[in-house]
Amino acid sequence: MNAIALGFDRARYETRVYFRQGDTILFTFLFPIIMLTIFSVAFSSAGNIGARPDGTGGVTPAAFYLPGMIAAGILLSGVQNLAVDIAVERGDGTLKRLAGTPLPVLSYFIGKLGQVFATSVLQVILLIVMAHFAFGVALPTRASAWLTFLWIYVFGMITSAVLGIALSRVPRSGKSATAVIIPIVLVLQFISGVYLQFSMLPVWLQNVASIFPLKWIAQGTRSVFLPSSFAVQEQGGDWNLGESRSSSASGSSSGWWPRS
Amino acid sequence: MTETEHVIVRDLRKTYGTFDAVAGVSFEIHRGETFALLGPNGAGKSTTIEILEGYRDRTSGSVSVLGTDPQTAGRDWRARLGMVLQSSGESGNVTVREQVAHFARIYPDPRDVDETIAAVGLSEKAGTRIKALSGGQRRRVDVALGVIGRPELLFLDEPTTGFDPEARREFWELIRSLKREGTTILLTTHYLDEAAQLSDRAGVIAGGRLIDIGRIDEIGGQEARTPVVRWRDSEGAHEERTAQPAALVARLYSTLGDSLDQLEVVRPSLEDIYLGLVAEFERRPAAEKELA
């Protein structure tokens, strides 16, 4: 088998293993869906967010939180999933064993990215379907909005995956992987406008968040799913999609394969 | 390929700072032979093997494994090797068959998946997830993954740690069948009876140096193999080394008669010889160790 075909084989194998891990399903796959449900139910009596003084306009809490939860899902599927997964595989000897076989490094990467994309596409579809049918969130009808969403998604996913691979070198052992990675990812979600309305945060914190990709991914998904009247709440009073595109996490992944 | 020497190591050195983990080791492993590398923990065994496997770079010396330098070897070379590492990945959420079949697809000319599972005695567990297996059964999966690619050279790094005696015997049979197929095997183990059972030759490493190498029935030299006669009489316990134990026993019986008690004639096992070799090395003065 060539490296590409082996990579797809790895992707199938990895995706199968992913769905057999209860903790991964709960904390990575279902987490944004659970959070969306909690926010929607918790704030359901608070009325619409962004409503005019007379009570008209604005969006429901579910609609308001959907873009943030999609962004969180992209981050979790990429960063948290890959960083923990690879750190554990380095710790328990899986990487070393694979490095002793003729498996090309490229195939390993294709396998990981394939698993990340497969699980994350499913996650985003579940989120959107659930928001629409369970919480009555109106979805964009223009094709151009979905096209924007597509590139934000692909861009966000690649950035998250690269960041996840880079972060996988941070934990000192496989056992400490979740303890090291989850807090990083959680803090990012709080300062990037996923759980808290971004415009409420102090400017300096907004600037810190702008260094990381999640803020831009979340801003991008808000531009797709929220009415344009929400744009004024963004930094600079605009969706700034151009900047979303150019802000990218740079992570070196050299030296992670355990053979020289 | 038809190299007569599957492994050639010449004056291999690996230095970490000022510490010589491996300080000038030379040996070769012939095609089709089983070679045991013995030595205490921290003696340089694992470092040597990891250099042969291509996981570590050497400081100096030359190494050829299947005619190739592991430091620059690629995919084709790895396809001819099998490795059962000391510790291996968990991958507990796949079944035995899924795991073995997945690894089979990595190799160009793999063995049959079900036959390999049968060979390691896991046919009944083929559909079981690896995390539900016992430690010894997981180790058999490791062995299956090590041999699935039909290796010409197989590294077995402490393969039977955690096995019960019965499982160990069955494992030995598996290794013998691989040997019959012509597989060259490099074995490390702390069980000296295992090394004696399986290997043709052995090398003993201590302090980063090869302190002895030879056929299993010759290693340690003639002196170390001299039988020991032990007995008790009215004066207490006695022990005497002699090349003619029968003559000694006959003499003892003629002088002591029925007061001769708990008579034993013991041929030193590989373990006795190994412990003797290592103890002798430890007793050497530091300067002499440097020269060894």
Image (cartoon, helix red, strand yellow):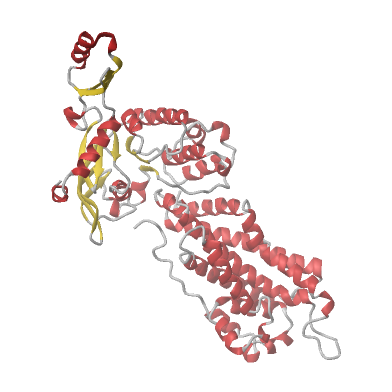
Pick whichever, B261 or A107, lies toward us: B261
Residue A19 is at least partly visible in this image? yes
Place residue B179 in its image quadrant: top left
- Which part of the image, by quadrant, shows the N terminus of chain B? top left
For the point 27% across and 17% down, the residue is B233
Q: Is A131 left or right of A218, judged from the image as shown?
A: right
In the displayed structure image, the side of residue A106 where residue A158 appears, left or right: right
Residue in the foreground of this view, choosing between A39 and B234: B234
Residue drawn where x is 52% and y is 44% of the image: B99
Q: In which quarter of the image is residue B180?
A: top left
- Could you say where residue B13 lies in the image, as x and y percent from the top left? 22, 53
Q: Which residue lies furthest to the front in this view?
A: B235
Q: Where is residue A31 in the image (x, y as percent from the top left)?
A: 67, 64
Nearer to us in this view, B138 or B2: B138
Q: Position of residue B140 (x, y in %)?
A: 47, 37
**Residue depicted at 60% across the width and 79% down the height:** A215
Viewer can see residue B202: no
Q: Where is residue A45 in the image (x, y as percent from the top left)?
A: 84, 76
Does B174 sit left or right of A149 as displayed? left
Q: Which residue is drawn at 45% across and 65% down?
A: A169
- Residue A231 versus residue B199 in the image, above or below: below
